[in-house]
Image (spheres, rainbow, N blue to C red):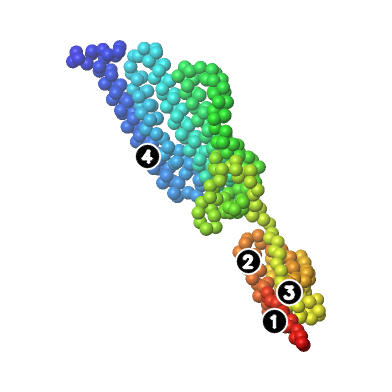
C-alpha cells in the first residue's frame, strides 16, 4: 500500500482520503441534525399558539448547504498538515461562510419580526407598519453592508481605504442617479413625516385610490376601478394630496329649489323641515339651512350638515335617507320642487 503513502502537498493520499471521508461524514451528520431539528420545531410550532417557535423553525429552515459544506470542509482540514498561508486562507473562507449564514439568519429574524408586527398593527396603526417596513429595509441594508466589510477585512482588504474611496465614488454616483435618490429620500420623508400610510384613500390631481404599498422608489395605489396606479415618491410629495384616510367626519352641502308660487309661510317652514330630516338620522350633526337666493326658475335653499362616520358609503346612506324624508314632508306640506321652466307672457295688440 505504498501508493497510499505518496505525499501530495505535504500530506499522504491516505490522509487526504481520511480528510475527505471526515468532511463527507460531517456534512451528512450536519444535514441530518438540521433536518431533524427543523422538523421537530415545526411540529411543536403547530401545537402551540406562540410565535417564537415559528421563528426558530424559520431560522433553521434558512440554514444553507453552503454553510454546512464549509463547516464540513473545515472539519476535514483539521487532519491535514497545511502551509500557514493555506491555513489562513481556509480559515478566512470559513469565516466568510459563517458571516453569510449569520446574515441570512439575522435577515430572517428581521423579516419575521416585521411580518409579525404588521399582522398585529395593520388594523390599529398603519403608520407604524409603514415605518417598520422602511426600518426593516434599512436594517437589512446595514446588516449586509457590515457583513461585506467584515468579509473583505477578513480577506486582507484595507477597508479604510475602501470606505474612503466609496465616499468619493458615492458623489459621482449621486450625480448620475439624482432621480432615483430623489425618490429614495421621498420614501424616507413619507415614512418619517407620514403624510399618508398604507390603507389611506388619496386623491392626487386626477388620480385616486387606496395606498397598497410604499416602496423605495414608488408608491402604489389601487384605484376604485381596480387597476394599480404607480407614482414616484418624489412626484407624489410634490403634488397636492387629499388624504381621505385622515377624515374624521364628512361635511355635506346640498341645495334644494322650490317653485316661485310657494307661499311665504311654507318658505319659512322649509329650513325646519330640512333640519328635522337631518336630525332624525343617526351619526349626523346639523349645521345650517337657509333660503339662499332667487334663482332663474326656483327659490333656492342651501343646507350644510356633518356625518360623524367618515366612510363614503355611510355618508351616501344618510344622504339618501334625508332626501327621502324631505320628499315625504314636502308631499305632506304640498311644497313643489322646482325644475327648469320658463313662463311666456303673450300680449294681444289691437290694430
List the single residue furthest toward the bottom. Answer: 350
* Residue at image location 46% in from the left, 34% down from the top: 104
The residue at 75%/84% (across/down) is: 347
Q: Nearer the viewer, mark 2 or mark 4?
A: 2
Q: Earlier in the sequence, mark 1 or mark 3?
A: 3
For residue 47, say whether it is visible: yes
Give the quadrant of the C terminus.
bottom right
Badges 1 and 3: C-beta atoms under 8 Å apart? no
Give the residue pinned by disc 2: 316
- Distance from the alpha carbon under mark 3 to that under mark 4: 84 Å
Q: Is residue 61 rendered to the left or right of residue 341?
A: left
Q: Are marks 2 and 1 in contact (CB under 8 Å)?
A: no
Answer with the quarter of the image where residue 323 lies.
bottom right
Disc 4 and disc 1 in contact, CB within 8 angstroms: no
Crowdedness near tag 3: few (<14), some (14–19) or many (≥20) residues, C-alpha within 10 Å: many
Residue at 22% x, 16% y is 4
Alpha-carbon span between mark 4 and mark 1: 80 Å
Which residue position is annotated with label 4? 36
The x and y percentages for residue 273 are 75, 75
- Element marked by disc 1: helix
Could you tell me residue 280's position as x and y percent? Answer: 71, 72
Amino acid at each position: 500500500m505504498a501508493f497510499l503513502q505518496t505525499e501530495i502537498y505535504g500530506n499522504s493520499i491516505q490522509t487526504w482520503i481520511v480528510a475527505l471521508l471526515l468532511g463527507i461524514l460531517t456534512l451528512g451528520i450536519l444535514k441530518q441534525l438540521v433536518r431533524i431539528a427543523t422538523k421537530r420545531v415545526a411540529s411543536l410550532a403547530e401545537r402551540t399558539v406562540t410565535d417564537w417557535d415559528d421563528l426558530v423553525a424559520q431560522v433553521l429552515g434558512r440554514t444553507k448547504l453552503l454553510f454546512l459544506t464549509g463547516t464540513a470542509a473545515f472539519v476535514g482540514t483539521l487532519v491535514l498538515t497545511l502551509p500557514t498561508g493555506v491555513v489562513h486562507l481556509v480559515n478566512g473562507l470559513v469565516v466568510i461562510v459563517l458571516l453569510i449564514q449569520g446574515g441570512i439568519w439575522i435577515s430572517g429574524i428581521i423579516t419575521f419580526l416585521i411580518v409579525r408586527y404588521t399582522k398585529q398593527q395593520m388594523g390599529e396603526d398603519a403608520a407604524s407598519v409603514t415605518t417598520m417596513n422602511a426600518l426593516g429595509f434599512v436594517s437589512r441594508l446595514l446588516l449586509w453592508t457590515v457583513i461585506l466589510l467584515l468579509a473583505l477585512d477578513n480577506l486582507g482588504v484595507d477597508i479604510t481605504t475602501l470606505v474612503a474611496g466609496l465616499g468619493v465614488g458615492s458623489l459621482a454616483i449621486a450625480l448620475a442617479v439624482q432621480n432615483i435618490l430623489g425618490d429614495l429620500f421621498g420614501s424616507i420623508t413619507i415614512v418619517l413625516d407620514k403624510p399618508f400610510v398604507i390603507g389611506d384613500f388619496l386623491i392626487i390631481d386626477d388620480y385616486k385610490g387606496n395606498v397598497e404599498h410604499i416602496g423605495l422608489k414608488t408608491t402604489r395605489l389601487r384605484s376604485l376601478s381596480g387597476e394599480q396606479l404607480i407614482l414616484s415618491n418624489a412626484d407624489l410629495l410634490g403634488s397636492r394630496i387629499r388624504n381621505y384616510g385622515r377624515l374624521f367626519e364628512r361635511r355635506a352641502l346640498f341645495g334644494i329649489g322650490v317653485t316661485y308660487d310657494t307661499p311665504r309661510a311654507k318658505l319659512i317652514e322649509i329650513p325646519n323641515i330640512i333640519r328635522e330630516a337631518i336630525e332624525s338620522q343617526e351619526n349626523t350633526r346639523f349645521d345650517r339651512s337657509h333660503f339662499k337666493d332667487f334663482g332663474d326658475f326656483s327659490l333656492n335653499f342651501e343646507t350644510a350638515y356633518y356625518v360623524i362616520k367618515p366612510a363614503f358609503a355611510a355618508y351616501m346612506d344618510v344622504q339618501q335617507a334625508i332626501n327621502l324624508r324631505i320628499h315625504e314632508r314636502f308631499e305632506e306640506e304640498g311644497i313643489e320642487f322646482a325644475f327648469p321652466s320658463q313662463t311666456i307672457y303673450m300680449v294681444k295688440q289691437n290694430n
